[in-house]
Amino acid sequence: MKKLFAAMLALSTLTALTSSVEAQLTTGRQRQKSMLQVEDEQKKKAAEKAEQEYEATMRKAQGQGGDQTAVDPWANMRAVDGAQPKH
C-alpha cells in the first residue's frame, strides 16, 4: 500500500511540474486562435466600424443643419401689420 501511495504521489508531482513548465514555455509564443475567437474579433471590428460611421454621419448632419429658421405654417392665415383678417 505504501508503494502505491508513493507512486501516485510521485506521478502527481511530476504532472504538476511538467504542466507549469509547459505553461512557462508557451507564454512567450503566440497561441493559435480558435474559429470562434476569430469570428468574435471580426464581429467586434465590424461593430466598431459601424459605430464610427454612425458618429461621422451624425456630426456631418449636425454641421449641415446649423442655420435652421422656424417655419410658421399659419403665416398666410394671419393678417399683415397686425390688422384683423377678414372672415
Image (cartoon, rainbow, N blue to C red):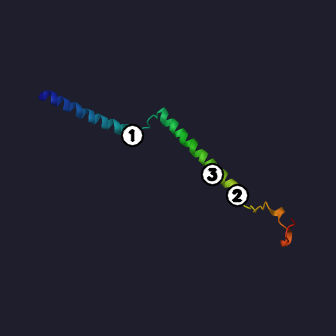
Cα separation between marks 1 and 3? 38 Å
Q: Quadrant of the N terminus?
A: top left
Badge 3, how many Cα within 10 Å: few under 14, some, many 20+? few
Q: Is residue 41 left or right of residue 15?
A: right
| Label 1 vs label 3, nearer the camera | 3
Quarter of the rendering containing residue 43: top right
* Three-letter amino acid code of the residue under disc 1: Thr
Question: Is 61 displayed left or right of 48 in the figure?
Answer: right
Task: Give the class, few, some or many, for how many residues have Cα within 10 Å of label 1's Cα (few <14, many ≥20).
Answer: few
Residues at circles 1 and 2 in contact by the CB criterion of under 8 Å: no
Pointer 3: what residue?
55
Residue underneath mark 1: 27
SS label for mark 1: loop
- Residue nearest the observer in this picture, 68 or 79: 79
> How many tags in the picture?
3
Extreme residue in the right direction: 86
In the rendered image, residue 13, in percent from the top left (x then y), is placed at 23, 34
Q: Are marks 1 and 3 in contact (CB under 8 Å)?
A: no
Q: Nearer the viewer, residue 60 or 28?
A: 60
In the structure shown, which secondary structural element does the residue marked by tag 3 occupy?
helix
Q: Quick one: label 1 or label 3, which is nearer the N terminus?
A: 1
Q: Nearer the viewer, mark 1 or mark 2?
A: 2
Give the CA separation, mark 1 to mark 2.
49 Å
Residue 65 location, quadrant: bottom right
Quarter of the image that includes the C terminus: bottom right
**Looking at the picture, how far across and down is residue 21, in whole percent?**
31, 37
Residue indicated by mark 2:
63
Could you give the CA–CA distance between mark 2 and mark 3, rounded to whole angstroms?
12 Å
Residue 35 lies, with reference to residue 66, above or below; the image says: above
Looking at the image, which residue is at 39% across and 40% down? 27
